[in-house]
């Protein structure tokens, strides 16, 4: 008898768990809602090229704003912007410090590439369930750049049809 009760409860538990996976989440954002995402990345890495090894140590602090810019009965529009960026890069005995609040060294390709990413909004349109319908990303051209990899920045890729997450 105990086994039958236990089996019944087990089946009930798994049935409810399976049903929970079938429910789509539905967002309820308001026009003007704004979220701030702060990310701190510290990394130590080795880049190898042939017989040459280069140690790279980085620390990056990035502040992004995510703002609801439009809404309608089918979904939402978001503007995602890197508001501030502070990077420290050490390699080959040299140190580079980039702060988006300070002027860029015109001779530094790394600083120019990092500066290009600041205050360049990514525009996303999502449906009520969080599926990306369309996007415009001016920083996408730099996402695979080796210079940004040295900075320890993990690019955020948005693709049409993917699920949009705020974290």
Image (cartoon, rainbow, N blue to C red):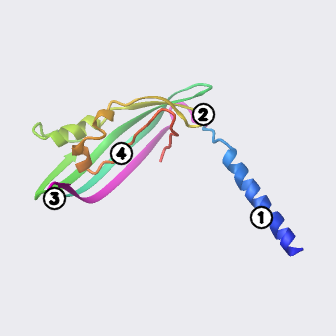
Is residue 32 within the magenta segment? Answer: yes
Check the image and name the residue furthest to the right: 1
- Answer left or right for 58 relative to 132: left
Residue 16 x %, y %? 75, 54
Name the residue beneath numbered marker 1. 10
Q: Residues within 10 Å of mark 1 (few under 14, many from 20)?
A: few
Name the residue beneath numbered marker 3. 53
Q: Distance of mark 1 from mark 2, alpha carbons? A: 34 Å
Assign a secondary structure to mark 2: loop
Total marks shown come to 4
N-terminal label among 4 and 2: 4
Which of the labelled discs sits on residue 63, or is there none?
A: 4
Is residue 29 within the magenta segment? Answer: yes
Callout in the foreground (3, 4): 3
**Which SS does the magenta portion mostly show?**
strand
- Nearest the eye: 71 or 124: 124
N-terminal label among 1 and 2: 1
Name the residue beneath numbered marker 2. 128
Where does the magenta region start and end?
28-50
Assign a secondary structure to mark 1: helix
Residue name at image x 57 percent, y 33 percent: 30
Residue name at image x 73 percent, y 58 percent: 14
């Amino acid at each position: 008898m105990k086994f039958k009760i236990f089996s019944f409860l087990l089946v009930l538990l798994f049935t409810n768990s399976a049903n929970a996976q079938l429910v789509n989440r539905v967002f309820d954002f308001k026009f003007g809602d704004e979220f701030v995402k702060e990310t701190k990345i510290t990394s130590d890495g080795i880049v190898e090229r042939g017989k040459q090894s280069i140690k790279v140590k980085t620390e990056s602090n990035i502040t992004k704003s995510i703002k609801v810019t439009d809404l309608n009965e089918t979904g939402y529009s978001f503007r995602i912007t890197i508001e501030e960026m502070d990077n420290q890069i050490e390699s080959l005995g040299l140190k580079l410090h980039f702060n988006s609040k300070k002027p860029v060294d015109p001779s530094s390709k790394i600083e120019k590439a990092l500066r290009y990413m600041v205050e360049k909004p990514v525009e996303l349109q999502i449906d009520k369930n969080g599926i990306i319908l369309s996007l415009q990303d001016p920083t996408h051209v730099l996402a695979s750049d080796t210079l940004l990899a040295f900075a320890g920045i993990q690019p955020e890729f948005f693709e049409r049809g993917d699920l949009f997450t705020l974290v």
